[in-house]
Amino acid sequence: MNIIHTSNAPAAIGPYSQAIVANGLVYTSGQIALDPASGVIGETTVEGQTEQAIRNLNAVLAEAGSDLTRVVKTTCFLRHMSDFAAFNAVYAKYFTGKPARSCVEVSALPKAALVEIECVAEVKE
């Protein structure tokens, strides 16, 4: 088991790792739209927050030796299910391999985020 940390994505805001690599897979913690440099959410729309969350997720995957094309499963959390179509439009640009996915509405997310995404991906050999 290998703990993953990169300064190219926001530091964990609790007692957890950005990701763990085990048995050829990387398991990421959820990524919200925190800017890695400032530590704040600068985007106010679900589209902007989805873009930043995916950039953060991609940075964690890169540190683990993976990328978005190797994602096999995502779990997505939306603050408002009414944002589903707008979220999907951005998500579809990045997850072109169409990994398995769950997407649910939640009552709240850390830092009042509108979206959070976590994933499981293969690590490059």
Image: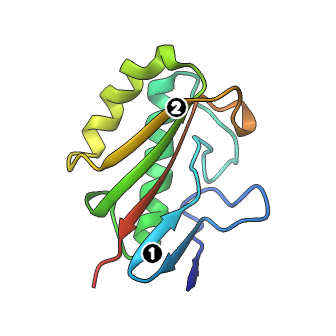
Which of the image's four quarters has the C terminus?
bottom left
Q: Is 62 rendered above or below residue 125? A: above
What amino acid type should be assigned to the residue bearing mark 1? Ala
27 and 34: which one is in front?
27
For the point 20% across and 50% down, the residue is 97
Secondary structure beneath disc 2?
A: strand
The disc at residue 41 is: none
Q: Is residue 6 left or right of residue 87?
A: right
For the point 31% across and 26% down, the residue is 89
Residue 13 image point, x, y percent: 76, 55
Query: Which residue position is annotated with label 1?
Result: 64
For the point 46% across and 61% down, the residue is 59
Query: First in sequence: mark 1 or mark 2?
Result: 1
Query: Which residue position is annotated with label 2?
Result: 104
Residue 15 image point, x, y percent: 79, 64
Q: Is 49 rendered above or below residue 98? A: above
In the picture as drawn, the residue positioned furthest to the left comes out as: 97
Which of the image's four quarters has the N terminus?
bottom right
Q: Is residue 63 left or right of residue 16?
A: left
- The tally of labels here is 2
Pointers 1 and 2 in contact (C-beta within 8 Å): no
Residue 26 image point, x, y percent: 45, 71
Q: What is the basis of the colouring in this image?
A: rainbow
Residue 23 image point, x, y percent: 43, 83
Q: Is residue 113 left or right of residue 23?
A: right
- Report how far apart the C-alphas of labels 1 and 2 lie in the structure: 26 Å
What amino acid type should be assigned to the residue bearing mark 2? Val
For label 1, the crowd category at 10 Å Cα-Cα, with few meaning under 14, some 14 to 19 and many 20 or more, is: many
